Image (tube, rainbow, N blue to C red):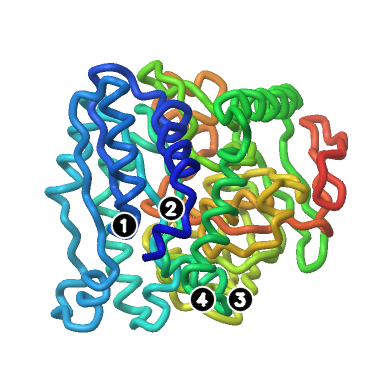
């Protein structure tokens, strides 16, 4: 049993952190929880702490890796153009009624690596389109939501392939507990201090009101325009329902909305991207007038191209995030094959949908105003890493002035 490789006291702290710091769950509020079945020990603890916090009802949907694979290996061809729209409509209705959302991340990141990329792409597109009514509530930060990790055995063996399963799970668990600050004597106080530091970065960047960011480094010469009236976010924030939450545990990033029409140049990935079970390596993209006109990758390019072609916004940028190379996740030296972690090891950008609250006045901004200011719209949102200790970033002022933002991956 790999569960014995996971410190039960630390797992208990992580569950408590997910409910209090991650969600800020309010008394009487319902919770919608999704989890891999391998994460059942954490899901049970989260339900316990949610009810102790006064949750009205905790509803959980579990996923299973073998059932997922059964679809790709035995499913009828028409299956891959379908998604449970009825389920997502119900989820959107739950969000309308102020239900909180928590996802446990812990599946095998390479689960679909050997499956037909055409089927994977079709299934992803169908799912993304069906999920859009619910996703809009998330990207608009209308409710309190969060994601937390669990060291599932298949994920652990992907990260530590040379170790016995129990050893791999223990290593991944300890890495998770370190990254989520569970190892500290008072994790809640540690997160409070961390959030304050991230908020200071956001205040400075928003105050600068840069017109663009200029990235320079090996394989990268990119000018990334920022949306008009953008605001930088990071750490804990207040959702539109008035509840303070941390959307990602862990998190090391500050992020904002780029202008979908004002991105020019070439940018190269500094880490592989694990996307829906496919490893995409050595990505390089060329932008003209905000649109990706050329994509290169030594592995997984077809899957990435199919995702980007989901809609018009799939070939434009919806998020830009800054992460110092000295972040704890980066310094661990571990490639997690999991976006929740790897995006917090390096500065990154995201293809597709923007976050509509990353604007000054974002609490009340309309979709039409988001578009007018340059925000992107898409059914996809795919983060990939472009930062390292060899990347410099400058802020370009509205008057053309240059301000150093990062040098060799560190805050300037």
- Per the rendering, the mark at residue 150 is 2
Label 4: how many residues lie within 10 Å, few (<14), some (14-19) or many (20+)? few
- Per the rendering, the mark at residue 296 is 3
- Per the rendering, the mark at residue 36 is 1
| Label 2–label 1 contact, CB within 8 A | yes
- Per the rendering, the mark at residue 164 is 4
Q: Identify the image quadrant of residue 196.
A: top right
Secondary structure state at the residue bearing disc 2: loop
Q: Identify the image quadrant of residue 363.
A: top left
Name which of mark 2 and mark 4 comes first in the sequence.
2
Find the distance from the CA under tag 2 to the CA under tag 3. Answer: 32 Å
Name which of mark 1 and mark 3 comes first in the sequence.
1
Secondary structure state at the residue bearing disc 1: strand
Secondary structure state at the residue bearing disc 4: loop
Left or right of 292? Residue 213 is right
Find the distance from the CA under tag 2 to the CA under tag 4. Answer: 18 Å
Question: Which of 131 and 353 lies nearest the eye of the viewer?
Answer: 131
Residue at horizontal 60 percent and vertical 38 percent from the top: 181
The image shows residue 368, relative to residue 80, as above or below, that is above
Name which of mark 4 and mark 3 comes first in the sequence.
4
Left or right of 139? Residue 83 is left
């Amino acid at each position: 049993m790999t569960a014995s490789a996971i410190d039960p006291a630390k797992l208990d702290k992580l569950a408590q952190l997910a409910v209090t710091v991650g969600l800020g769950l309010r008394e009487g509020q319902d919770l919608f929880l999704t989890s891999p079945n391998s994460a059942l020990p954490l899901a049970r603890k989260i339900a316990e702490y949610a009810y102790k916090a006064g949750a009205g009802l905790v509803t959980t949907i579990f996923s299973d890796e073998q059932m997922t694979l059964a679809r790709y290996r035995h499913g009828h061809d028409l299956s891959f153009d379908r998604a449970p729209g009825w389920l997502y409509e119900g989820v959107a209705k739950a969000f309308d009624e102020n239900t909180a959302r928590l996802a446990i991340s812990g599946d095998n990141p390479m689960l679909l690596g050997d499956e037909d990329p055409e089927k994977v792409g079709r299934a992803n597109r169908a799912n993304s389109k069906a999920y859009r009514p619910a996703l809009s509530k998330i990207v608009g930060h209308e409710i309190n939501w969060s994601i937390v990790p669990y060291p599932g055995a298949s994920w652990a063996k992907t990260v530590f392939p040379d170790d016995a399963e129990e050893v791999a799970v223990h290593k991944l668990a300890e890495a998770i507990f370190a990254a989520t600050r569970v190892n500290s004597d008072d994790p809640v106080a540690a997160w409070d201090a961390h959030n304050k530091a991230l908020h200071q970065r956001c205040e400075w960047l928003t105050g600068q009101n840069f017109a663009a960011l200029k990235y320079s480094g090996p394989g990268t010469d990119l000018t990334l325009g920022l949306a008009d009236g953008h605001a930088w976010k990071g750490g804990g924030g207040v959702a539109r329902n008035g509840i303070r939450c941390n959307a990602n545990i862990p998190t090391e990033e500050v992020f904002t909305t780029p202008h979908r029409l004002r991105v020019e140049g070439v940018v190269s990935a500094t880490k592989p991207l694990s996307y829906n079970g496919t490893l995409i390596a050595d990505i390089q993209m060329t932008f003209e007038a905000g649109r990706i006109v050329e994509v290169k990758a030594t592995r997984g390019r077809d899957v990435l191209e199919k995702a980007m072609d989901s809609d018009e916004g799939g070939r434009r940028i919806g998020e830009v995030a800054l992460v110092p190379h000295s972040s704890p996740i980066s310094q661990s030296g571990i490639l997690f094959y999991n976006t929740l972690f790897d995006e917090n090891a390096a500065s990154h950008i995201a293809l597709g949908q923007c976050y509509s609250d990353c604007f000054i006045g974002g609490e009340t901004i309309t979709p039409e105003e988001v578009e007018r200011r340059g925000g992107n719209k898409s059914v996809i949102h795919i983060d990939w890493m472009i930062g390292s200790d060899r990347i410099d970033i400058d802020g370009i002022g509205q008057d053309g002035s240059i301000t150093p933002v990062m040098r060799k991956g560190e805050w300037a």
